[in-house]
Amino acid sequence: KISAEVFKAINELKKTIPDGYEIGVARDLSEFIVDSVDDVLKNLILGILITAIFLYIFLHDIWSTLIATLDLPTSIIATFILIYFAGFTINVITLMALGISIGILATNDIIILESINRHIAAGESPKEAAINGTTEVAVAVGASTLTNIMVFTPIAFMSGIVGQFFKQFGLTVVFATIFSLLVSFTMTPMLASKLLGQKKKKNWLGITKLKLIILIKEKIDSFFKKFDEAYDEVVIKYKSSLTWCLGNKKKTVLGTVMILFFSLFLITLVGGEFFPYSDEGYLSINVELPPGARLEETEEIMEEIAAIAEKLEVVETLFITVGGENKGVNEGQLILGLVDLSERDILTRDFANMIRYDLAIIPGVDIVITEESGGPESSADLVINVTGPEIGTISSLAANMEKTMKEMDGLVDVDTSEKLPSPEIQFIPDRFKIANYGINSSDIYTILRASYEGIVPSLYKEGGEEYDIKVRLSEGDRTKEDTFGEIRVKTTRGMVPIEQLGVVVFGQGESEIQRHNRQDLVEVLANVGSGTMGEFETKIKNAIDEMDVPDGYTLKLGGDSETKAESFAALFQALFLAIVLTYIVLAAILESYVHPMTIMLTLPLGLIGTAMGLFIGGQTINMFSLMAMVMLVGIVVNNAILILDYTSVLRDGGMKRRDALMTASPIRLRPIVMANLAIAFAILPQALGGADAGHRTTIAVVTIGGVVFSAIFTLYLIPVAYEFFDRFTVRGRAESPKKDSVNNRRLGKR
C-alpha cells in the first residue's frame, strides 16, 4: 500500500522536474512482496482444486467431492474472522499457513465422508449413515484435530526471532483447524444426509441423449472400475504383508530401525543454514578505500565498478552512493537490480560469485558483495566475534582466524571489521594557559567544531524554499596540518592562535571502536560462495578448538549463526512441548497410558520421511524445515489414531486382538491413503517456483515426505507395536492368561 502511494507521488513529481533530470527506482522490494503474496494465494486456490480432483477419483461421487470442496473454502473464509480479531494481515506467512492447512482441513472431511459412504453401501439410509458414520469416527477426528492444535499452539508462542516469524503462522493454522472441526461435525454430515445415496436418475445430468456426454460418462465409469479393481488388489496384498509382519515382529522392527538410522545419515548430508535461499534479484557491492581517500577517488572507483556491471546483460538497475550515514567518504555502495528470475538463467548468488572475479582486477580496495536473501539482514553469512580485554591481542587472534578461513574452499569476502587507523589531529589544552586567557575548554571546542564541521548561522530563501547556510573552513584548509595551529580563538586578551593554548598532535586514530559485553570486539567476516553455512560452522568451531586462545579471550560464532542456534533451540523446545501435549491429549481421549506410546512411535517414522524429503528435494536443515518437523508431530499420529480407534471399537464388540487388527487396518487403509495423499497433493503447489519459493519449498518437501513415508510405515509397524504394548494393558492381560493356561496344561502333561 505504501509503495503504491510512493509510485503515485513519483509520477506526480515527474511532471514538475526540470528537463534533463529523471526519477528512477533503484530498489523496489515491494514488488517481491506482492509477487510472493500472489504466488501463495494462487497456490492456495490450486491446492483446493487439486484436492477436489483427488477426492473425486477416490470417492467416485460428484456429491461427496462437492461437499468436501465446499467445506474447504468455508473453513478458510471463517478463519479470516479470527485472523482479523487477532490483528493479523493477509501476508506470506498467514497465506502459507492456510495453504498448508488445506490438506489437514480435508483430512477430517475425508474420514467422515468415507465412513458415511461405507454405511450407505451397507444399506443404511443417508440420514442414518450420516449420524452413524460421523459418530463412528468422532473420537478419531476429534483426537486428530486436538493433536494438531496442541502442536501448532507452542509454535505460535515461541520466543525470539523465530517466535515473531511463526506467531501468525501457528495461530492461523489453529484457527483453521478449529473451524474445520466445527464444519466437519455439522455441515459435512448435514449435506451428506441430503446429497448422498440418492437414487440416480436415468437421465445423467438430463442430457444423456448427447453422444459425447454418454461417451464421457462411460469412460469415467470404466476408469473408476479399473481404479477399484486396482485398489482391491492393493488391499489383498496389504492384508498378506500385514499378516507376515505380525508373524515376524522382530524382522519388521529391525528393518524399520535400520531405515531410521539410514535416514539420520541422510540428514547429516543435507547441511544446515538459518534461512532457506530465496532469489530476490538484488546485490549490494560495498567498497572501502584506504582511510584518508578523497571523495573524488571513491567516486572514480565506484564509476569503474559500475562500468563493469553495466556490461552484464542480466543487470537491470544500478544505483551508486558514496559516503552517507555512519560512513566515511572512503566508502561506497553499488546496488544492482537483476532482471526477473524468469528472464535469466543464473541465480543471484551465482551471479555474485561471477562478478567477484570481474572486480578482482581493481587494486587497493576492499570489496564485499552481499545479496538480499529474504531473511534478516546481517553483515555477512558468517561472523566470528573475537573479544577480550586488550585490543592488540584481539587483533592478533582475529588475523589468525582470518588466515585460517581464507584457506577454506568455498568461503569468499573473508575480512575483519578492524579498520585501518585514519589521519587524526589531537589538541590537548593546557588548563593553566587557557585560564590565564579567561576562557575554558568548551570555548575551544566550539571554535574547532565550527571550523571543521561547520555551523548554520542563517538560512537562504529563494522561490519559497529555504536552504541552510553552513560556514566552515574551505576544503583545502581543512586538509592542511599547518592550518590547524593557526586557528584563532577569541580571548579576554584578543585573538590567540590555538597552538599557544595547548599541544597539537598529528597522528593516527581508530576509525571505529566495537564493544561486546563490555569488552573490545573485532569481527571476522565471510560469505559462503559454495556449500552450506552448517558445514563451515563445523569447520570454524574445529579451527577455534585448535587455536591457542589466552585466558580472558573468546572466539565464537555470532551473527546469523548465533541467531540460528537460539532459534533452533526454541524450535526444539516447541517440538518437545508438542510431543508432551500430544501424549497428554491421546491419553485423555483413549483413556490409556500405554497405547498413546504406541501412537507416538509414528514420530520417528515421520523423521524418515523428513530425511527423504530433504535429500530428494535438495533442501537443508533450516528454520522452516525444523518448523515443518514440529508440524508433522500433529499430522503423522493421525494414521495410528484411525487404526487403533477402530481396533478398540471392534474389541469392545468382542473381537480378539489379532482379528481386530486384521479387520481394522484394511478398513482404515482407504481413509489413511486418501488423507495423506490429500495433504501431499494439497501442499504440492507450495513446492512450485515463484517469488520467495525457498520458504514454501522447504516446508512442502518436509511435509510431503513426512506424511507419505510415515503412512507407509505406520500401516505395518503400528499393528506390530500394538500387539506388543497391549500386553501391558488390562484388556491385553485378560487375553494372555488363556495362552498361559494352555502352556501350563502342556507342562502338566509332561
Image (spheres, rainbow, N blue to C red):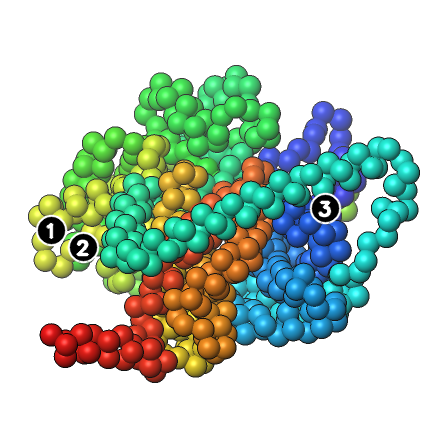
Residue pointed to by mark 3: 4
Image height of 494 relative to 138, above or below: above
382 with respect to 703 (left or right): left
Label at residue 554: 2
**Residue 405's spot in the image, x, y percent?**
22, 37
Instruction: Say which quarter of the image contains residue 398.
Output: top left
**Is residue 125 visible to the viewer in this orientation of the structure?**
yes
Q: Are marks 1 and 2 in contact (CB under 8 Å)?
A: yes
Image height of 362 relative to 718, above or below: above
Other residues around mark 3 within 10 Å, as few (<14) / some (14–19) / many (≥20): few
Instruction: Say which quarter of the image contains residue 102.
Output: bottom right
Residue pointed to by mark 1: 549
At x 52%, y 17%, the residue is 311
Q: Amino acid at mark 1?
A: Val
Whole-number angstrom distance, CA of label 1 to CA of label 2: 7 Å
Q: Are marks 3 and 2 in contact (CB under 8 Å)?
A: no
Whole-number angstrom distance, CA of label 3 to CA of label 1: 54 Å
Image height of 19 relative to 456, above or below: above
At x 57%, y 30%, the residue is 341
Q: Which sits earlier in the primary sequence, circle 3 or circle 2?
A: 3
Q: Nearer the viewer, residue 338 or 260?
A: 260
Q: Amino acid at mark 3?
A: Ala
Instruction: Say which quarter of the image contains residue 123.
Output: bottom right
Element on which disc 3 rests: helix
At x 43%, y 28%, the residue is 350
**Is residue 82 visible to the viewer in this orientation of the structure?**
no
687 with respect to 400 (left or right): right
Other residues around mark 1 within 10 Å, as few (<14) / some (14–19) / many (≥20): some
Whole-number angstrom distance, CA of label 3 to CA of label 2: 48 Å
